[in-house]
Amino acid sequence: MKVEIRKISDIKDYKEIPYIQKSAWGFSELDLEPHQLMTRVQKYGGLVMGLFVDGKIAGFSYAILAKWKGKLFLYSHMAAVKKEYQGRGFGYLIKKAQREEALKMGYDFIKWTFDPLESLNSYFNIHRLGAVGFEYELNIYGIGESGLHKGLPTDRMVAHWELNSERVKRRMGEKTPPVIIESSPPPPDFTSEKIYIEIPSNIRQLKKKNMEKALKWRYRTREEFLKAFEKGYVAVDIVFTKGRERVYYLLEKNYDYRK
């Protein structure tokens, strides 16, 4: 198997991206990002990259030019791998290539949003890649109507990826094992230097079994994250109890994510 990641240039590869979105997330036609826009983003400061397996596109990343606090950066709107290629480490390879290309283009950081209740993706973003979170947005797409979003308000945490920080260099350079804590921590008091916010271990299964409980998780964690970020906490890791039975965000107060 030959795997290659490069900037997309061929229109036939752009046209495959909506099908990858459907495969990865189960999106309806209404939710798909059009390939035509991506060609313009590529030309004018953004970055669209493809993961090619044996010459055929199997994944992509899609980042647009944006501005935050007076600085230009890349907002990574989408990154996905076809369902049949998931679980092989290709997601990491896509983000690694995106980081390297963004640095060549002169960008210092990348941002993207993700569902903070999705434990595996949260772990990948924060623990594996070294991104941090200190912004929370409410229901940014409305109530989810298809795929992974279906049924819940689309609250999102904003990942901030400081590309040249020692934290990110360390996480990208060496795969570190999960952090296992001895016992379940207390609920956040918002006064300690470190606090923990619990999330469900598998929100997708919970939604299938009991949507009411899933909604309660959304609303409770929404309040906790909003209060934590207002008080200067930063989400710096995802940790587990023994057997990975329970999952928590670790947040530190006034954490310097640029180091």
Image (spheres, grey):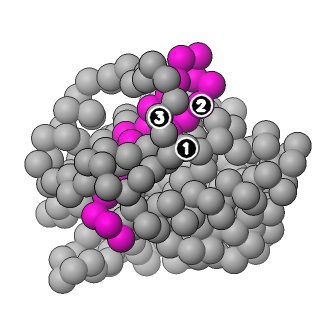
Q: Residues within 10 Å of mark 3 (few under 14, many from 20)?
A: few
The CA distance from mark 1 to mark 3 is 9 Å
187 lies above or below 233:
above
Label 2 SS: loop
Residue highlighted by disc 3: 185
State which tag comes first along the sequence, 1 or 3: 3
In front of the other: 257 or 226: 226
Residue 3 lies in magenta, yes or no? no
The circle on residue 246 is: 2
User: Which residue appears at 27% of the width and 34% of the height?
Assistant: 172
27 lies above or below 129:
below
The CA distance from mark 3 to mark 2 is 10 Å
State which tag comes first along the sequence, 1 or 2: 1
Q: Residues within 10 Å of mark 1 (few under 14, many from 20)?
A: many
Residue 238 lies in magenta, yes or no? yes
User: Which residue appears at 56% of the width and 74% of the height?
Assistant: 138
**In contact (CB < 8 Å): disc 1 and disc 2:** yes
Residue 150 seen from this side: yes
Q: Nearer the viewer, mark 3 or mark 2?
A: 3
Label 1 SS: strand
Q: Which span is picked out in magenta? A: 230-250
In this picture, residue 80 sits left or right of residue 210: left
User: Percent x, y for residue 76?
Assistant: 41, 62
In front of the other: 235 or 40: 235
Residue highlighted by disc 1: 198
User: Which residue appears at 38% of the width and 20% of the height?
Assistant: 177
